[in-house]
Image (cartoon, rainbow, N blue to C red):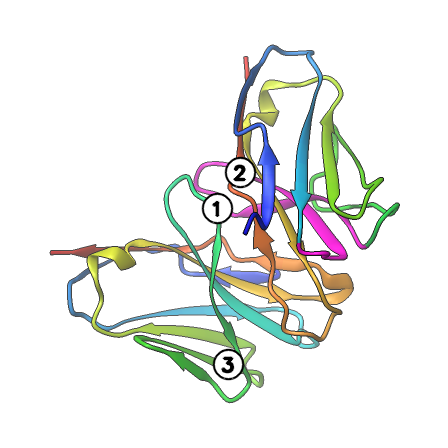
Amino acid sequence: NAGVTQTPKFRVLKTGQSMTLLCAQDMNHEYMYWYRQDPGMGLRLIHYSVGEGTTAKGEVPDGYNVSRLKKQNFLLGLESAAPSQTSVYFCASSSGHDYSNQPQHFGDGTRLSIL
Amino acid sequence: RKEVEQDPGPFNVPEGATVAFNCTYSNSASQSFFWYRQDCRKEPKLLMSVYSSGNEDGRFTAQLNRASQYISLLIRDSKLSDSATYLCVVKGNFNKFYFGSGTKLNVKP
């Protein structure tokens, strides 16, 4: 059971480089999310998607772009990486509506360092 | 004000102890609540959902107090393997999830 898969697991970039993080889920979930987690801090929502072809900004969207061209995939892009974007990135997905008790399922994270 | 607030701890307890974590949330319209567990450098994993009447899963008991906007998690007979950070999570509108900063638990032999 794959669940939520993130690639790559680790990456080191130089300031100004670009890259795309891929998240894939095989649970047919409508909703997908990208979070970042910094040492000693909680999860902060970057962007999310409520369905194929839709995206919305979260709490900390600056410096990131996303796309959801296929229901199972949610891509997070860094156009010009900055050291402040060094973090662990988690993707998550969920099903159901606002008042359902369906939780989020997480990928195992991408550790990104920007020098 | 944060959507979800937790005591960051750490809670240092001996094996076999009972420990309780609390969490408050700000949106009175929230309908779904969860406890997640996160091990160091790993992804959050669902521990249990929290139901209105309270629920139990083995050594773990979750309670919800809507009037006080308060969620709790009780761990009985703590094991070394329970050492982790426990995240309180509240589901809001548009299927957005709000995470507390987590409470760190250290269970000592």
Residue drawn at x 70%, y 66% as measured from the top left:
B92
The numbered mark 2 sits on a residue in which chain? A
Kind of residue indicated by mark 1: Glu
Q: Quadrant of residue A59?
A: top right
Residue drawn at x 73%, y 68% as measured from the top left:
A96
Query: Would you name the residue on which mark 1 appears?
Result: B43
Query: Would you name the residue on which mark 3 appears?
Result: B64
Kind of residue indicated by mark 3: Leu
Give the vertical position of B58 relative to A39 (above or below). Answer: below
Total marks shown come to: 3
Query: Would you name the residue on which mark 2 appears?
Result: A109
The numbered mark 3 sits on a residue in which chain? B
Circles 3 and 1 on the same subunit = yes
Q: Where is residue B4 in the image (x, y as percent from the top left)?
A: 56, 62
Residue drawn at x 73%, y 28% as measured from the top left:
A77
Please tell me whether mark 1 sits on a helix, a strand or a loop: loop
Range of residues picked out in magenta: A27-50
Kind of residue indicated by mark 2: Gly
Category of crowding for the residue at label 1, using alpha-carbon neighbours closer than 10 angstroms: few (below 14), some (14–19), many (at least 20): many
Q: Is residue A43 magenta?
A: yes
Q: Where is residue A6 in the image (x, y as percent from the top left)?
A: 60, 37
**What is the CA distance from the residue labelled 2 to the residue labelled 3?**
30 Å
The numbered mark 1 sits on a residue in which chain? B
Q: Quadrant of residue B91?
A: bottom right
